[in-house]
């Protein structure tokens, strides 16, 4: 008999979750901590990170705040090293932090904005993976979860650069999964639809746009960060031990609707 608790038990594991001071990242961090993991809360906002870590500790979990700008390679290296000093080996990496500084047609985006999107949303994932995967391989165990978006699966007339970066994240997951699978390391993506977060505020506060979106959403609502946290827990835990190189769409059915 398989005990459900064992399938999702992360006791003794350590997880880094980028962009975890709010929204989807915060929900994922809370879920991992609730399953027993030591969780590192990280974003650029030091005070917000500490607030989240304190809330997890108050609820009986284990968490530390280690601020970091994902666009700075030296800060990412410091994040990894500080995590190892605090908790030991890193077992789970959740790459959630992302930026979207531009809304408009691709033909008009300036080089600086495009470079920032790719650097923050794609290159930082590769940097972090390169820092963490070798020590996961040494232990023949590890899980990486990259938070992408359904924007990476469809065309867009307004967030094309962001969509490009999120499509790239899916390919990063597939390629890393192929490269590191022999070391029992799993790498997967999550592709949320519109979620009730500050990051997507411009979308869900636009009544006309939301009315159109809900009309073609089979579940009839937009997502909550907790809706993403469960899938992240699956991919990080023993329950997902035979899943790798995949992108799980979590969008209330938008991508399959007419």
Image (cartoon, grey):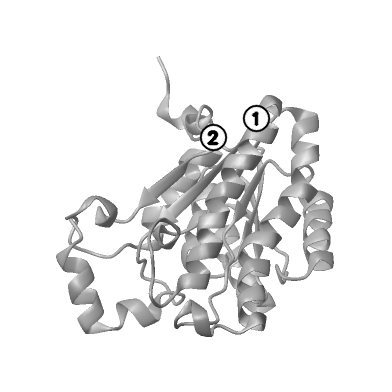
- Given the current orientation, which residue lies at the most extreme top position? 1
Callout 2: 10 Å neighbours few (<14), some, many (20+)? many
Q: Quarter holding the C terminus?
A: bottom left
Q: In this rendering, does residue 68 appear at all?
A: yes
- Asked if the residues shown at circle 1 and circle 2 are in contact, with their CB atoms under 8 angstroms apart, the answer is yes
For the residue pair 18 and 98, the one nearer the viewer reads as 98
Q: CA distance from mark 1 to mark 2?
A: 8 Å
Q: In this rendering, does residue 26 appear at all?
A: no
Q: Is residue 120 above or below residue 253?
A: below
Query: Would you name the residue on which mark 1 appears?
Result: 181
The structure residue drawn at horizontal position 32% and vertical position 62%, both measured from the top left corner, is 223
SS of the residue under disc 2: loop
For the residue pair 16 and 253, the one nearer the viewer reads as 253
* Residue 209, image quadrant: bottom left
Q: Quarter holding the N terminus?
A: top left
Query: Would you name the residue on which mark 2 appears?
Result: 244
Residue 215: x %, y % from top left:
15, 67
Q: Earlier in the sequence, mark 1 or mark 2?
A: 1
Residue 122: x %, y % from top left:
63, 60
* Residue 136, image quadrant: top right
The structure residue drawn at horizontal position 63% and vertical position 33%, both measured from the top left corner, is 178
Tag count: 2
Residue 227: x %, y % from top left:
36, 55
- Given the current orientation, which residue lies at the most extreme front position? 107
SS of the residue under disc 1: helix
The structure residue drawn at horizontal position 63% and vertical position 70%, both measured from the top left corner, is 49
The structure residue drawn at horizontal position 80% and vertical position 65%, both measured from the top left corner, is 73
* Residue 121, image quadrant: bottom right
For residue 211, the mark is none
């Amino acid at each position: 008999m398989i005990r459900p608790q064992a399938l999702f038990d992360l006791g003794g594991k350590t997880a880094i979750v980028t962009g975890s001071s709010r929204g989807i990242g915060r929900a994922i961090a809370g879920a991992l901590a609730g399953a027993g993991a030591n969780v590192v809360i990280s974003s650029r906002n030091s005070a917000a990170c500490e607030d989240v870590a304190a809330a997890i500790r108050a609820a009986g979990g284990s968490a530390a705040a280690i601020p970091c700008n994902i666009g700075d390679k030296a800060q990412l290296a410091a994040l990894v090293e500080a995590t190892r000093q605090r908790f030991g080996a890193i077992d789970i990496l959740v790459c959630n932090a992302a930026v979207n500084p531009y809304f408009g047609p691709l033909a008009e985006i300036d080089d600086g904005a495009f470079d920032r999107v790719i650097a923050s949303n794609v290159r930082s994932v590769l940097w972090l993976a390169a820092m963490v995967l070798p020590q996961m391989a040494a232990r023949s165990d590890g899980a990486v979860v990259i938070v992408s978006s359904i924007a990476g699966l469809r065309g867009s007339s307004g967030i094309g650069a962001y969509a490009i970066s999120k499509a790239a994240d899916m390919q990063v997951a597939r390629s890393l999964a192929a490269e590191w699978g022999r070391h029992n390391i799993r790498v997967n993506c999550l592709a949320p639809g519109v979620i009730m977060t500050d990051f997507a505020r411009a979308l869900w506060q636009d009544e006309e746009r939301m009315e159109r979106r809900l009309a073609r959403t089979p579940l009839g609502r937009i997502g909550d960060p907790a809706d993403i946290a469960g899938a992240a827990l699956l991919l990080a835990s023993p329950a997902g031990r035979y899943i790798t190189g995949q992108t799980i769409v979590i969008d209330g059915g938008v991508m399959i609707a007419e």
